[in-house]
Image: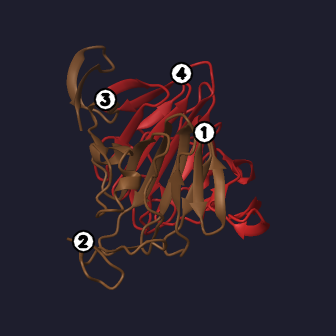
Chain colours: A brown, B red
Amino acid sequence: MHNTRMHNRSDQPMESPVPKIDISQVPERQGSGYPSPFAEAASARIKQALGDAGGLTDFGVNLTRLPPGAWSSQRHWHTDEDEFLYVLSGKLSLVTDAGEQPLVAHDFAAFPKNRADGHHLVNRGTQMAVYLEIGSRHALDRCHYPDIDLHWDGAVGVYAHKDGTPYP
Amino acid sequence: MHNTRMHNRSDQPMESPVPKIDISQVPERQGSGYPSPFAEAASARIKQALGDAGGLTDFGVNLTRLPPGAWSSQRHWHTDEDEFLYVLSGKLSLVTDAGEQPLVAHDFAAFPKNRADGHHLVNRGTQMAVYLEIGSRHALDRCHYPDIDLHWDGAVGVYAHKDGTPYP
C-alpha cells in the first residue's frame, strides 16, 4: 500500500494508507519465467501486479500490455486455479482447442480450473492491447501446456519436461 | 457457458463451448439483499455476474453500473474475502475511514480481507459509472458495517442486528 496525501471529511490534510493505488507506482515486469526456447513468444508482455500492490492474497490481478506480435503466454490450462480476463483496449486473438476468437475492448473470457482446454492470447493487430487478468492462487496448482514439452507442478516449483525432468 | 457458432482452425463451422462470453446474455441483477431501510441506498445498482457466467468458483467478477446518486453498497469490510475494483467509466467517490477519494476510469482500489476499514462507492456525478469488482469467496466470511446496525455472518446466512438478532 502507498501513503497518499489526501483530505479527510473535515478537509484537514492527513497522511493515511488508502485503498486507491497510484498505478504509476506499481512496478512493471516484462517477459515470462519460461525456459528457453519457450520464453521468446511471451518476452514482450508487460505486467503490473495490481492486486499484489494492494495487499491482496486470495487472487492476483494483473494489468497486462501486449504489443503487436506478442503472446500472453504459452497455451496452457490450470488444474486448481480459475482465470478470468477482461479486455480494455486493442484487439486480441483468443486461441483454444476450438480455434481462434477475436476479443476487443469490453470482451471477457473465463477459464475454470481443471477444464482441459489450453488457452492463450495473441496480438495479431497493429496496436498495443491492454487487458486485466485475474487468477486465483493455489500452491499445489499444476499447469499443462498441450503444445510443447513443458509442465509446471506447484509442489515441485520448477518448470519441467513432460517426463518430469527439470529444465536447467 | 454459452455455445457460440465459431470457426475452427480449418475454417469449418463448429458448435463448441468457448471461453468468450456474450455479455448481453449475462443476467442483470438490480439492488441488494439488505433489509429495510438499508436496501434503499443501493437499490439502483445493477450487477452482471461475469465470473459466474464463465463457470468460475474461486472468485466472483461483477460488471457493475451505478447511476448518479446511487451507492455501491453500505460501507463494509470483510473478515475473509479480498476485494478489488477497477473503474471503467464515470466518476465515483470512494469512502473509507480516511475520508473520500475520487475514482475515475482506470483507477483501481484494493481491500484486503480483515482490514477493519469500511468502504463503499458513491456516484456523486451526473453520469452512469461502470466498474469491475472482484471478490474472493469464503463460506464463513463475516461482514462488518461500521455505520449502521447490520452484520453478516456466513455461518448463519442471514442479515442480523449487531446483537445477533436476525432481520425479518
Q: Are discs 3 and 2 located on one and the same chain?
A: yes
| Marked residue nearer the N-terminal end (2 or 1) | 1
Side of A49 relative to B103 (left or right): left
Q: Amino acid at mark 2?
A: Val
- Residue A161 picture location, percent across and down: 32, 78
Which class describes the residues within 10 Å of circle 1: few (<14), some (14-19), or many (20+)? some
Which residue matches tag 2?
A: A158
Separation of marks 3 and 2 at Cα, in angstroms: 31 Å
Q: Amino acid at mark 4?
A: Arg
Q: Are discs 4 and 3 located on one and the same chain?
A: no
Q: Nearer the viewer, residue A33 or B135?
A: A33
Which residue matches tag 3?
A: A24
Query: Which of labels 4 and 3 is toward the front?
Result: 3
In the image, what residue occupies the spot 78% across and 68% down? B14
| Marked residue nearer the N-terminal end (3 or 1) | 3
Res A16 seen here = yes
Answer yes or no: do the residues labelled 3 and 1 have beta carbons within 8 Å? no
Q: Secondary structure at mark 2?
A: loop
Separation of marks 3 and 1 at Cα, in angstroms: 22 Å
Q: Chain of mark 2?
A: A
In the image, what residue occupies the spot 52% across and 53% down? A121
Q: Amino acid at mark 1?
A: Ala
Res B35 seen here = no
Q: Which mark is residue B124?
A: 4
- Residue B146 picture location, percent across and down: 37, 41
Which residue matches tag 1?
A: A105
